[in-house]
Image (cartoon, rainbow, N blue to C red):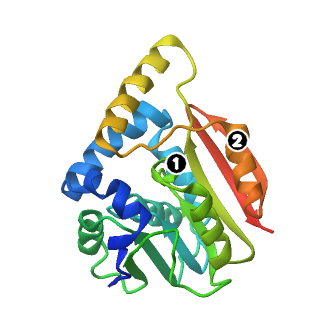
Amino acid sequence: MTLESQNPNNSIAQSKGADAYRDPSWWYDIRGFFILMGTYQVMIWTHLAFFAKNLGNKHLEAAIGSGTFLALTLLTKKILGGKLPEEIIGIDYAERMLQGAQILFKSNKSVKLVQADLGNINYPDAYFDSVNIAHSFHAFPDPDKVLKELNRVMKPKAHLYADVLLAPRGGCLRRAIATRVNRFCFKKGILARTCDPETTKAQFESNHFNVINSYIKGNTYHIIAEKD
């Protein structure tokens, strides 16, 4: 495992959200589990099975956070009998998150951590075979800029998997729980927006992705997109 900094200090992401991720990574993991259950309202193994399907030979995790979810995704892939990537790039702008990922992947030579803004990725065109956006789309200050940049570094016909947080839906209790958790996340600065399926799909398509499958489960819009 290696760590590279691409000087995110002047990035859009750094200027708008870094303060939200100053907690220790272990606390973020604990808090994040309950946020996932309360807002996305999808069981953790459903998320893992979804993202484990999209691990190409050169894989980009955008954003990697503390690395815990990626580690569990790789474990899920291994249990299911699939081939693991030879190269994994995990990008995040939050130093505290990457500190946790460093510890987690210190003996994994296939993982490289990069502190950078996803709107400015220092990799060549058509480099990655797969990209996963695991519960981070809601925190992007400029989703269009990120999608455009991800499209650039993906190989033709490469797949991008994303789970997108929707506005609270379902029964009264489910909506009440999601609304309360979302309010906390907005206050902490770890939630920039909730989304709606139609607008999000159009957003991907306007950035040269072909949405080959999408569906809603809980408060989550799952997207499988292919680079045009």
Q: Residue at x 60, y 81 (%)?
A: 57
Quadrant holding the C terminus: bottom right
Confirm whether residue 142 shows in the render.
Answer: yes
Where, by quadrant of the figure, is residue 148 drawn? Answer: bottom right
- Up-down relation of residue 70 to residue 16 (above or below): below
Q: Is residue 160 above or below residue 179?
A: below
Q: Position of residue 225 (x, y in %)?
A: 72, 59
Q: Is residue 67 above or below residue 199?
A: below
Residue receiving disc 1: 47
On the image, the x and y values in percent for residue 213 come to 76, 50
User: Is 28 rendered above or below residue 74?
Assistant: above
The total number of labels drawn is 2
Give 104 or 65, whichever is nearer the viewer. 65
Amino acid on which the number 1 mark rests in the picture: His
Quarter holding the N terminus? bottom left
Residue occupying the point 27% across, 55% down: 21
Q: Residue at x 36, y 46 (%)?
A: 190
SS at badge 1: helix
Residue 141 vs residue 159, the one in the foreground? 141
What's the amino acid at mark 2? Thr
Q: Is residue 198 left or right of residue 192?
A: right
> Which residue, given by chain and number where applicable, does mark 2 sit on?
199
Give the crowd class for mark 2: few <14, some 14-19, many >=20 residues within 10 Å: few
User: Going by the image, does 167 lie left or right of 106?
Assistant: right
The numbered mark, 2 or 1, whose residue comes first in the sequence reads 1
